[in-house]
């Protein structure tokens, strides 16, 4: 179980950093902080909390537990889908 915790923790931290990088890129590109809606901001906070939890699990400050592993996996799956929408899927446009 420790290897699964380390894998999910490192993946949570990496996905959180990628999402923060994308958010910072959008803010530099001209988007205002006031333009961020509540739901995406709330989802970003959940993902960042998961990344923080993953960091603490990775360095050994928290004891690995099965519910934490399940919680991380349940947050990692939609995060991967979100990042797929951001980076790999072509934007829909009128053509």
Image: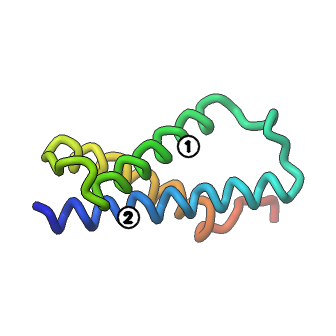
Q: CA distance from mark 1 to mark 2?
A: 16 Å
Q: Could you tell me which residue is drawn at 59 percent across and 32 percent down?
A: 39
* The N terminus: image quadrant: bottom left
83 relative to 51, above or below: below
Estimate the x, y position of residue 58 in percent, counting from the top left.
30, 60
* The C terminus: image quadrant: bottom right
Label 2 sits on a secondary structure element that is helix
Relative horizontal placement of residue 74, taking residue 16 as reference (left or right) = left
Question: What number is the disc on residue 65?
Answer: none
Estimate the x, y position of residue 40 in percent, counting from the top left.
61, 38
Residue 41 location, quadrant: top right
Q: Could you tell me which residue is drawn at 56 percent across and 63 percent down?
A: 18
4 vs 80, nearest the viewer: 4
* Disc nearer the start of the sequence (1/2): 2
Label 1 sits on a secondary structure element that is helix
Numbered label tally: 2
Tag 2 residue: 11
Residue 77 location, quadrant: bottom left
Looking at the image, which residue sits at the far left? 1
Q: Could you tell me which residue is drawn at 59 percent across and 70 percent down?
A: 88
Estimate the x, y position of residue 48 in percent, counting from the top left.
50, 46
Colouring style: rainbow
Instruction: Please tell me how crowded label 2 is: few (under 14), some (14-19), or many (20+) other residues with Cα within 10 Å.
Output: some
Looking at the image, which residue sits at the far front? 61
Looking at the image, which residue sits at the far right? 30
Tag 1 residue: 44
68 relative to 80, above or below: above
Relative horizontal placement of residue 3, taking residue 28 as reference (left or right) = left
């Amino acid at each position: 179980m420790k290897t699964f915790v380390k894998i999910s923790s490192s993946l949570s931290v990496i996905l959180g950093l990628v999402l923060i990088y994308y958010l910072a890129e959008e803010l530099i590109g001209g988007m205002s902080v006031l333009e961020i809606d509540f739901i995406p901001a709330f989802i970003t906070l959940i993902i960042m909390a998961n990344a923080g939890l993953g960091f603490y699990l990775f360095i050994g400050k928290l004891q690995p537990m099965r519910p934490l592993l399940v919680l991380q996996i349940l947050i990692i799956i939609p995060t991967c889908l979100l990042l797929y929408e951001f980076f790999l899927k072509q934007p829909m446009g009128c053509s």
